[in-house]
Each structure stands twice: as C-alpha cells, then as structure tokens.
Image (cartoon, rainbow, N blue to C red):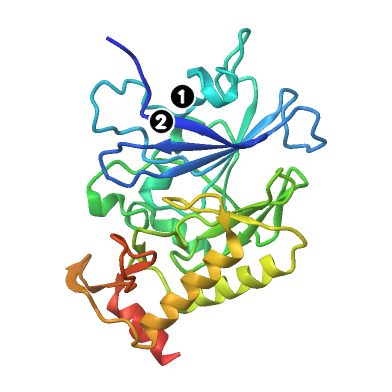
Amino acid sequence: MCKYPAFNATRLTSSTFLIKEFDDIYSEHPYVYAIIIPAKSKSVLSSRHGTIILIDTGCGGASNDPNARISSLREFIETVEVTDNDNKPLNGDDDRQGRMGYIVVLTHCHYDHILGVEHFSDSPILASSHYPEFFHNIPEHSLCNFLDIHTPKYKPTLVPHGHRISNRITILHTPGHTPDSLTVYDPTSALPMLYVGDSLYEYEPIIFPNEGSIVDWFRSMEALIEFVRNQESLILLNAGHVTCLEPALTVLQAAKVFIEDVVGGREPVRRRWVKRGEQTVEYRQNTTGETNSRFSLICPERLLLDSRRT
C-alpha cells in the first residue's frame, strides 16, 4: 500500500516553507511554517548542520484518509521529498535524516497548533511568558478537554516580549485570541514575514475562546500596526489558517476595522448558541457578490460586552 503523508509543503521564500495539514479530522487545516537557518549562521542556537525554526506543529497528522500513513510532522520533514525543495526532504539528504536541529515556537496552546509537539521533545519549545499561569491547565486551555482528546505533554520555555532567536527572528507578545498568543517577525527572509497565529485571518471566522479578550486583541493589533508601519520594507502576513503572503498592514487594519464595527453595533448578529457554557455569537462582514465574507467573528458574547464597557 502506498505510504503517503498527511502534509504537503510549498516554498514561500528561499529559506521558508509552508507546511499544510490539509485533511485533518478536526477540519482545522492548520498552517505550519518552517524557517531554515543554514549552518553558517552565527547563532549559538544553530546546530552545526543548521536549524529549522518551526512555527506551530499542527493537529498531529490525524487525517480523514486512512491511507495517509505518514502522520508525524517530524517524519514528514525528515523523509518526504518536497518538489519545491529540489525533490529532497526539508531536513534530510542522501546521507542522513534530521541533520538540522529544531526550535519550535508555539503561537498559542490550542490543540490544532500543539498536537504534533511531542515529536520534538528533544528540541527547545518556546511560548509566550505574558501570562505564565495560563500553562497551569493546558488540558482545558488547549481545548483538548473540550474535544476529549489526548493533551500533549511538553515543557515550554516561556520567553519575554522582544525575545530574539538566531539574532534575526523576534517574538512579540500579542495576547487577545488567548493570553499566550504571540507573533513571530522574521525581517531577514527574502520577503520579511509576520506570523500571527490565530490572531486573525481571512475567509474563516476569527474565533475567540472563553479565555480570550477582545480588549487585549485591540491593544495587540494596534501595537502590530504601529510595528509594521515603523519598518522600512513591505512585510507579508502569514496566519495559522487560510491567510498567507498577504500585505501585513492592509490585513491588520482591515481586520481591526471589522472588529470595531462589531463592537460598535454596526454589524448584526448572524447566529447564537451555547459553547463551553457561554452564550456565543457569530458575525459576518456583509460583502456583496462574495460567497464567503472576508472577515467573520465567533466569540462569547461576554467578550463583546466587556469591550463595549472599556
């Protein structure tokens, strides 16, 4: 029987790849990013063969297709030939698999970003130090309890706002979607990149869980907008789902305007239901002639009421 993977990979720049988990059982279709730092890098964190910085780890390869036998993200990276990488694995060659080391950066602890993390237990795993207490109950805050699935066991290193990796990549705390949400900025890619996790994306609902905060999200988006404006070159935005290689400033500003319209009562509620014990609401941007709204929102109504009182 053919052994094929639950993932595919495409090149974004000379040093960066997008890895898609394209048919997962949770219908999340998460985006994982691999930034390859060559061995010649002066970083003390780079192995002598180079380092791959992984942004998130996906859903653990749980595919709807029973024939997708390569379910480990690490196995995919080290053994599966990638067309955009001269038909070689991202981390392997004719002599040895897994020559490069890994640094894993988790944009937040939701299950669809951490279910593959146990395969990298021998590597540094970085997460936001903004709210350390949030990691005291990963089974609940990851939504693994809600879905009744295994919670990965991992011990992240909690890093501060402005933490640098390999003297080039900066971690920015951007709480809102969750208290531990972070953004990764890579200015030295051929195209400078901003990786925002689930803080926002297009054409799928921006979702806030019970633990989220729209008040904090606005502060984080304002900080990111100011950050991007202060850079000298065009920055592209990559999200944890759907959105990739879009102009960062344009997307950030447009998402912020939509959420402002929701908070300001200029968008109607499209749906109501109870989720995780909270009254939950959905809003969709009214866009004529398009099947899907560019922006939509699902969140506990309490978060909107908190934002309106602020």
* Residue marked by disc 1: 76
Residue 27 percent across, percent down from the top left: 28, 45
| Disc 2/disc 1 C-alpha distance (Å) | 7 Å
In this view, 297 is above or below 143: below
Image location of residue 124, percent across then percent down: 60, 39
Q: Residue furthest front?
A: 289
Quadrant, the C terminus = bottom left
Q: Nearer the viewer, mark 2 or mark 1?
A: 2
Q: Residues within 10 Å of mark 2 (few under 14, many from 20)?
A: many
Q: Which residue is mark 2?
A: 7
Q: Earlier in the sequence, mark 2 or mark 1?
A: 2
Q: Quadrant of residue 284?
A: bottom left
Q: Which of these two is toward me, 300 or 293?
A: 293
For the residue pair 164 and 290, the one nearer the viewer reads as 290
Secondary element type, mark 2: strand
| Circles 2, 1 touching at the beta carbon (< 8 Å) | yes
**What mark, if any, has residue 116 been given in the picture?**
none
Query: Foreground: 61 or 7?
Result: 7
Would you call the spot at circle 1 few (<14 residues within 10 Å), some (14-19), or many (20 or more)? many
Residue 278 coordinates in the image, percent (x, y)? 23, 72
